[in-house]
Image (spheres, coloured by chain):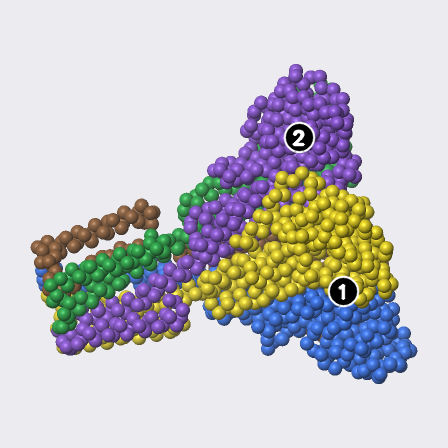
Chain colours: A green, B brown, C blue, D yellow, E purple
Amino acid sequence: MGKKRRLLRQMADKAGLPPGSLHYVGEHASQTLATLIEYGPGEQDLRETCFSSLEQGKGFNPTYPTLWLNVHGLGNIDLLQEVGRRFGLHPLTLEDILNTTQRTKVEAYEHYLFIVAKLGRFDAAQGCVVNEQIAIVLGRGWVLTFQEQASGTFSQIREHLRKGAGQVRKLGADYLVYALLDKIVDRYFGVLEALGEQVEALEDEVSEGAHIGVLKRIHALRREMLYLRRALWPMREVLNSLQRDDADYFGAETQIYLRDVYDHAVHLIEAQEMLRDLVGGLTDFYMSNQGNRLNREMRMLTVIATIFMPLTFIVGVYGMNFDHMPELHWRYGYYLVWALMGAIGVGMGWFFWRRRWL
Amino acid sequence: MGKKRRLLRQMADKAGLPPGSLHYVGEHASQTLATLIEYGPGEQDLRETCFSSLEQGKGFNPTYPTLWLNVHGLGNIDLLQEVGRRFGLHPLTLEDILNTTQRTKVEAYEHYLFIVAKLGRFDAAQGCVVNEQIAIVLGRGWVLTFQEQASGTFSQIREHLRKGAGQVRKLGADYLVYALLDKIVDRYFGVLEALGEQVEALEDEVSEGAHIGVLKRIHALRREMLYLRRALWPMREVLNSLQRDDADYFGAETQIYLRDVYDHAVHLIEAQEMLRDLVGGLTDFYMSNQGNRLNREMRMLTVIATIFMPLTFIVGVYGMNFDHMPELHWRYGYYLVWALMGAIGVGMGWFFWRRRWL
Amino acid sequence: MGKKRRLLRQMADKAGLPPGSLHYVGEHASQTLATLIEYGPGEQDLRETCFSSLEQGKGFNPTYPTLWLNVHGLGNIDLLQEVGRRFGLHPLTLEDILNTTQRTKVEAYEHYLFIVAKLGRFDAAQGCVVNEQIAIVLGRGWVLTFQEQASGTFSQIREHLRKGAGQVRKLGADYLVYALLDKIVDRYFGVLEALGEQVEALEDEVSEGAHIGVLKRIHALRREMLYLRRALWPMREVLNSLQRDDADYFGAETQIYLRDVYDHAVHLIEAQEMLRDLVGGLTDFYMSNQGNRLNREMRMLTVIATIFMPLTFIVGVYGMNFDHMPELHWRYGYYLVWALMGAIGVGMGWFFWRRRWL
Amino acid sequence: MGKKRRLLRQMADKAGLPPGSLHYVGEHASQTLATLIEYGPGEQDLRETCFSSLEQGKGFNPTYPTLWLNVHGLGNIDLLQEVGRRFGLHPLTLEDILNTTQRTKVEAYEHYLFIVAKLGRFDAAQGCVVNEQIAIVLGRGWVLTFQEQASGTFSQIREHLRKGAGQVRKLGADYLVYALLDKIVDRYFGVLEALGEQVEALEDEVSEGAHIGVLKRIHALRREMLYLRRALWPMREVLNSLQRDDADYFGAETQIYLRDVYDHAVHLIEAQEMLRDLVGGLTDFYMSNQGNRLNREMRMLTVIATIFMPLTFIVGVYGMNFDHMPELHWRYGYYLVWALMGAIGVGMGWFFWRRRWL
Amino acid sequence: MGKKRRLLRQMADKAGLPPGSLHYVGEHASQTLATLIEYGPGEQDLRETCFSSLEQGKGFNPTYPTLWLNVHGLGNIDLLQEVGRRFGLHPLTLEDILNTTQRTKVEAYEHYLFIVAKLGRFDAAQGCVVNEQIAIVLGRGWVLTFQEQASGTFSQIREHLRKGAGQVRKLGADYLVYALLDKIVDRYFGVLEALGEQVEALEDEVSEGAHIGVLKRIHALRREMLYLRRALWPMREVLNSLQRDDADYFGAETQIYLRDVYDHAVHLIEAQEMLRDLVGGLTDFYMSNQGNRLNREMRMLTVIATIFMPLTFIVGVYGMNFDHMPELHWRYGYYLVWALMGAIGVGMGWFFWRRRWL
């Protein structure tokens, strides 16, 4: 039930909105928390600020070359509008950040790139894929990220920044966006693994015998594949267009890394397509198994009926009450009938054995 | 019945028409009503006129930079010809406006763009998708819209114009066309939601058990998907070609908004494709369920036959009338037979229990 | 039978021909009749000549700017060769005109365009789509058309020419070709309508119950769809390439009209694809219905067997001839057995009612 | 069996070969026979030489503008290497000529075009499509052709050359290659016709009733379609790239003829695709027929069981041996039972007639 | 089981890795062994060195124009890093060499091409396709290859180098890469042959009769096809992009050879697609056979039931104990009943013979 609601939720409430109006449509209207990290290549060039309201965040003036503002929770619309004003975001960008039913996409605005991505997670309890929206804005020297709720996906990047580990401090805002996208894409490997395990389990169950519950689960898995597919394909498109079109935001150095994430995305899609084919084959497998089972049962019924119907007929014959039935008065009549029935039984058995039914 | 007629209606009457001849082919030959709105960016720059015949509308001279003429009801061909003459419409344009079986398309004429779109609506009573035609003509500073009947879709835009709310007064004719297309595209979210609910309901019914009526409804739903698909795909094409080719009619500012509508259309198509896949999977699900049911019934029949056929044979044996049947005269013969039959019954039960049939 | 021969006929006799040799392969070797119409924009600028042999047609010298030569019946090869000589047709063009198994195509020769199209018709008696070939040659100021037999498709255009109605007299040879193509394309709307009615009728029949004859008709309809598809898709291609590539034969004015025919062709293809999907869904629908019917019959058999097998067993028990069967001598034994059997019957009924089998 | 071996043969022996090594992999290691025809446009400009060994062919010096060397049988590797040396063929070209498992392709080398094609033939005895390889090398003024064995396909062209008929003597080496390709493509019409006849025959058989042998033949026909498809599609590609890319080898005059062969290839592919769809539909048709047959048999079983089970129960009742069974002593008890059973029979009949089972 | 683990293994462990970190994810952490071959066109221009640790390989200074360093076993990360430093490999390249779950791809870095390919092998024992990763780096005058374990695939090339046979010594590093790719591609012919034999065996088994084990094997074969497909398609892409884009690494001479490998890859893909279609058709064939078998069993059951049910009814009738049953006292009643039953049996037989059931 909960899974299906997802599809509908993604459509609802969308229709009535006038363009450019701000309204949060998600379910996680938790408290808004903004984290500002400014940094440069130098070892001490890092400043980290947290604020949860407009007043707290008022005076942020960038002192280091690169600035990353991450916002958790999208309930505080005033704060978002203030952020939009400072960084010159288009009204449609703000609208898309709040409307968390956007599809994965990249859009070039006058002085920034706007990327919407989905953070995939396999909810084992409900057995379904959950996609949370994350919006990334990349300007010249600054990056904004907006999430519905804290997911811990980027904590590793934050650690790297604090420690100055890797190239993340040296290579600027474009490398930071690469690192974010890399984390987002890599999370789907876990989702695929979880689905792959389900396919594996179902294959074993179908191959052992067909229960009615298996069918429902194959159907559900197929639906999850559709959701996953819908998340992965546009991701590839986005990474492809980042590589191709907008070379001015990403330096040559970062382009090589972007190609690597793109490659991971292609890898994911291929694995997903393969899983999809496996699930599709599973349905065929299940139905053939079903057919086999039907045949087996039918064969058993046929064998039983073919053996006992003539025998029952014979005993019926000698149960008739005619005055003149010579066999009834034969001394060994009864034993002859048993012999006849034995012969018929053996003959049938030989017949079925020859046709490989037994 | 009524649904199928739709397909035929869309084809009929088309063949015999000579090119350029004007003839309204729709069903809603209601009274023609034209509404003329002229407006500019200034607060008072708005004039609204209504007329329903040629005489009333004679003297309209535009005084403000942007002019929007909306026509409801296409029965008054004289009025349409007059409009065509004033705005220099090509005979084929007028023909297409009247022939409401056009497919969604955009065509560039010498000095205007001609857009045909479909206004989708889910008719819950008939359980089918209804597409009404709307024609939009975009010239330099003027917009014409033609509908078969009043639908209230654009009343919100008219309100915005009157109040001067949003950017609609400032950005001119191209933004107005964007706003119209946005409304048209967003209406399909409701259609998809209605269909999605039907898919959800059918999934529950199939999963509970297979009734014959479900099959008919799956078949009908599949047909509605085909109609919806046929409406959505060309819409995306139209929005795409508006973005790409005809940049001279749409300003850079409006292009960003057009991209947003295009995005909505892609979103709609993805959701529709997904629903289609779900409906397709539903048929498989239904057929597997059917197969399961057949197996279950077959198993029951086999169990019954396998248990009772040998027993009936045995009681038949001792119903024979041979003179010499020693068992009949045994003191406990009758009880021994019951014991034998009991053993057979228990044996069969154990056999079926081991094969998990019981 | 007759339908299948079609496919073979289209292939046979093709293989042995040396390139450029003239040989008519169609079935309608009726008398050749050529109609020559010369016309100009002026009211009296029209001359019409008919001739059926080389001698009659000898002295045709064009006096008006546009010339249209229509030939019915392709048996008179000498006449065709004479025509080919006068208008400088390539040997391959003449070969293609006579070989009426060509596919729809357009080919640019040095000083003319050569278009092969198919004139669709639904043969209600045989229940199949008939495609007759029509060849159109468009030069500078002249148009040649070649048909296997008179079909009356162009009589309306001839009338327009005689009356000087519409733009046909004014716009020259390219507009004439447009008018011809428009007629050819529009004839397929009738074909689609006829097929659509068949789909509709079959849907009703399947939904009411599955007869064996329905299956044959679905299979036949599917085959007709394949023929129709094969006729329509290349038509779209032809119209598309006329619009794009060969702009020098078609004036800007006529291009707008060509776009309109192209649009009709796309409309036809979409409707045909939709019909095809509907027919495809019909097979599934039929097979599911079949499965339902099987289930229903199986259920009935199971109910009957499950009720009567135990009862027959019981009456068999008391038909046994053992000397010592106490029940047989009970005063109310017979009635008790009836009571027992009644209880079993009621119990079974309750069981099946609870499982919704009755 | 023989058919399947084909697929494997096409793969085997390929793997171990070092690039550029010469080794004939086909089955027809018949004697090598080379035919050299030199010709020009003049009536006497033709010289024909035959040789089967290196020594015989030593002194061939071209005296006329166009030279055609045809080689039958690929066993004589020395001769081939000599030919390769004289005409400057690349080692890979020679390797591909000998390896007769190449796919249809065209490759441009520095000073010649290398075309590999398949000569299709329907082997009626084995019921399978046989593809023999033919290699064509087109240089400036010379053509080389290599076949596994003499097939008589080109004898007509040779006749034309000898008689000087048609344009073949006038138009040079490119026209000769066109004539060869035209022959190769046209041979497939016969193959398609043979397969089409099989489809037709199978359709009739399925429609009359389902035998088990039909299924095997449908499966085999489907496989032949795959082989045919694999031969035709690359042929179209080759003809397309000859038209487009390598205009320098083919004169403008010959290009028009090439377009004609290309058209034939497209025609073949469309007919093949259609046959494939028909065969696909045939499987569905067969399976539905099977389902119908199952239903019919099930219905018969159900009718029999439903009528006789209650009757057998009733006669069982009055076969019981209770001391007190009043009906047994009624004067007309026996006749009443017959009446009862008659009523049940008529009632069942009416029931089945109303449900249209009889 | 083992087969399915493959898919999961390819995904696992991938997610947590920070970009650029070196970690070997394969299963074959055997000892690292590096073989260095330097060579030039001259007969003596060859030096071969082997080393398995950093110290041994320290002083390699190229003396001949071309250098080939092959590394078996990827456990020694220090050695790999040293190699990376010397040849200026990008950190992502090293990461991809160690992460043996990469997909087949080619990537252009600043001064080298990086190719990842899969070495296919059919594991007959497990009945599955095994793909081992091989990484190739092509610089100006040098080639690096990295394999998980020694496979002997390149020993023939090494032999050619040592003997100076073929063109491999003359044509430099690009020809060496061609030779490596040729070996890699050609190995798949063996894989396809093995799978083709399985398809052949399964076809025979299905055609003889349907066992339950066949179904499992068809399903497994289908899965192997998916794995094979996933290996072959990107290979074609890689070869295509090598031909097109990066002409500066491959000389004109080598390009001709590359085209040949590309052709082999296309050949492989076509054969694989064909096998896939055959396996797909096999499932249909199996299911139709299953249906046939069901029909045959059902028919037998129906024949048995239809013959014996009326007979059993008749003998039941004369087993009734009514006081007044005149037939019982007829002299030839018993024989008449046998005659009646014989007549019914013959009638049924004739009925079934006429319906071709016997």
Where residue A183 sits in the image (x, y, percent)? 63, 32
Considering the numbered disc 2 on the image, is that residue within a helix, a strand or a loop?
helix
Considering the numbered disc 1 on the image, is that residue within a helix, a strand or a loop?
helix
**Quadrant where the N terminus of chain B is found in the figure:** bottom right
Are the residues flagged by discs 2 and 1 from a single subunit?
A: no
Where residue B287 sits in the image (x, y, percent)? 47, 56
Between B190 and E232, the one nearer to me in the picture? E232
Residue shown at the point (54%, 45%) measured from the top left: E195
Between D222 and E160, the one nearer to me in the picture? E160
- The label nearer to you, 2 versus 1, is 1
Going by the image, does B170 lie left or right of D355? Answer: right
Residue C101 location, quadrant:
bottom right
Please identify the residue farthest to the right as the structure is shown: C63
Name which residue type carries label 1: Glu
Between D86 and A171, the one nearer to me in the picture? D86
Please identify the residue farthest to the top as the structure is shown: E55
Residue C148 can be seen in this image: yes
Residue shown at the point (76%, 80%) measured from the top left: C32
Where residue C294 sits in the image (x, y, percent)? 41, 62
Q: Residues within 10 Å of mark 2 (few under 14, many from 20)?
A: few
Residue shown at the point (62%, 65%) measured from the top left: D193
Residue shown at the point (41%, 67%) measured from the top left: D296
Question: What residue did someone put label 2 on?
Answer: E159
Numbered mark located on residue E46 in the image: none
Going by the image, does E224 lie left or right of D96? Answer: left
Q: Residues within 10 Å of mark 1 (few under 14, many from 20)?
A: few
| Cα distance in 3D space between marks 2 and 1 | 52 Å
Name which residue type carries label 2: Glu
Residue B1 can be seen in this image: no
Between A159 and D319, the one nearer to me in the picture? D319
Question: What residue did someone put label 1 on?
Answer: D159
Give the chain letter at badge 1. Answer: D
